[in-house]
Amino acid sequence: MKVLHIIAGNLSGGAARGAYWLHQGLLAQGVDSKIYTTSRTSLNDDTVTTVFVSNKNKVATIIFALIDKLSTIFYRKRKRLIFSTGMVGQNFTNSVEYKEADIIHLHWINDGFVNMRHLSKIINKPVIWTMRDMWPMTGGCHYAMGCEKFKTGCGRCPQLSSNSTMDLSRLVLSYKKKYLSKTIKLVGISDWLSEQAHESEVFKGFDIRTIHNCINTKTFFPVEKRVARELLGINTGKKVVLAGSTSATDFYKGFDKYIDSLKLLDNNMYHLCFFGELDQELVKSTGLDFTSLGYLQDNISMRLAYSCADVYVAPSIMDAFGKTIVESMACGTPVVCFDATGPKDLVTHMKDGYKAVPFKPESLAEGIKWIVFSSDYGMLCENARDNAVLKFDAKNIAETYTQLYKEVLIK
């Protein structure tokens, strides 16, 4: 069986990294798996084809991405959030990789990579679409943030600040409905995301199931905390609380809730640690000591960051999955998250982490204190690692997808 993954974005980070780890897991299973991507790097992997190899395709990719971004230009009062149309993109069905494949596996396909119209050109090849955020089911937004218009056809989009029923969001949603075949098999990376898809206007009557996102637990594993702190230059006897994101200011990351929770902690007992984007003045307002690790570009640095902490806090108010949660657990560090959306599937309350009451900062603070001062802290760490390996390791998730591939080929 020959599987071709269509993936937009950099394979070394973000949603694309989970897809790449799945690809590696499939190769280990003996599946003939290949990737067709807009990633600027192929990671020196000869099973990866990036459009950036060809100057013609490179220019086209950049232009399509720009056109997609400019689609909202007439909505001057719109929220400055990612909004994608899926109305422009390269015709991947012309590629050699597509023609050789038995199965087409879509992942995150935005940023002007895939035009939804081209999906209708897929003939006699089963299609699986792993949904990595809410975009596949909406009129353009990637997280609906409480708006339920994707269930009825969109229009009057709050993220576009639109008062028109026949706005861009309705046009995008109608475009999807026109070109999406009901033979496509949909996969949500969390139960929550699958539930949202079941309720959507776009995916009424579609086959939808849940297969969790995956990580490589051979890449993320525990490092002794003392060693990790020494290597990172963190010299403290206090409890270390880690948080981070490539873009902590994203509206759905809940960083404001996290800051409010930190103000409830004793500044004599906790040291904060952050990776990624950070507003240092905002953190200083908590009165707590902190270390900023900046943007961590490699897995070794990330492994040390997770391992150095006594607890990792993921305060997202809406997330399709929560890959950093599972990475932290794989490194033996328990997690505090809200008991909502994708993250609620990942943590077992008071066994390998703590699920706080949505979306209460005081509950986040209680979770932090409960974990770091637990009399069974060592067991929490062991359980976190065991849970990550059992449920989210790329090998196990690849086995589940292999069964799905066999199912769609039989049909």
Image: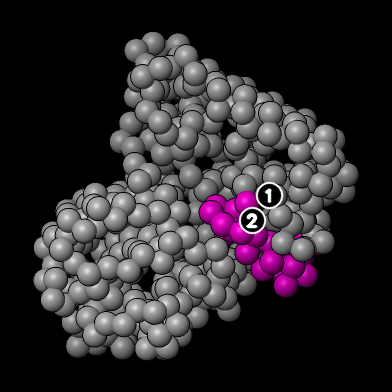
Q: Is residue 30 magenta?
A: yes
What residue is at 70 percent from the left and 50 percent from the top? 40
Q: Amino acid at mark 2?
A: Leu
Which residue position holds label 2? Answer: 11
Helix, strand or loop at label 1? It is: loop
Specify start and end residues of the magenta stretch as a single range: 10-34
Which residue position holds label 1? Answer: 39
Q: Is residue 58 magenta?
A: no
What residue is at 63 percent from the left and 32 percent from the top? 65
Q: Is residue 179 above or below residue 380?
A: above
Few, some or many residues within 10 Å of mark 1 (<14, 14–19, 20+): many
Q: Is residue 103 left or right of residue 234?
A: right
Do the residues under discs 1 and 2 have CB atoms within 8 angstroms? yes
Front-lying residue, 380 or 272:
272
For marks 1 and 2 on the same chain, the one whose residue lies earlier in the sequence: 2
Locate residue 256, reporting x and y percent. Answer: 24, 49
- Quadrant of residue 370 within the rendered picture: bottom left
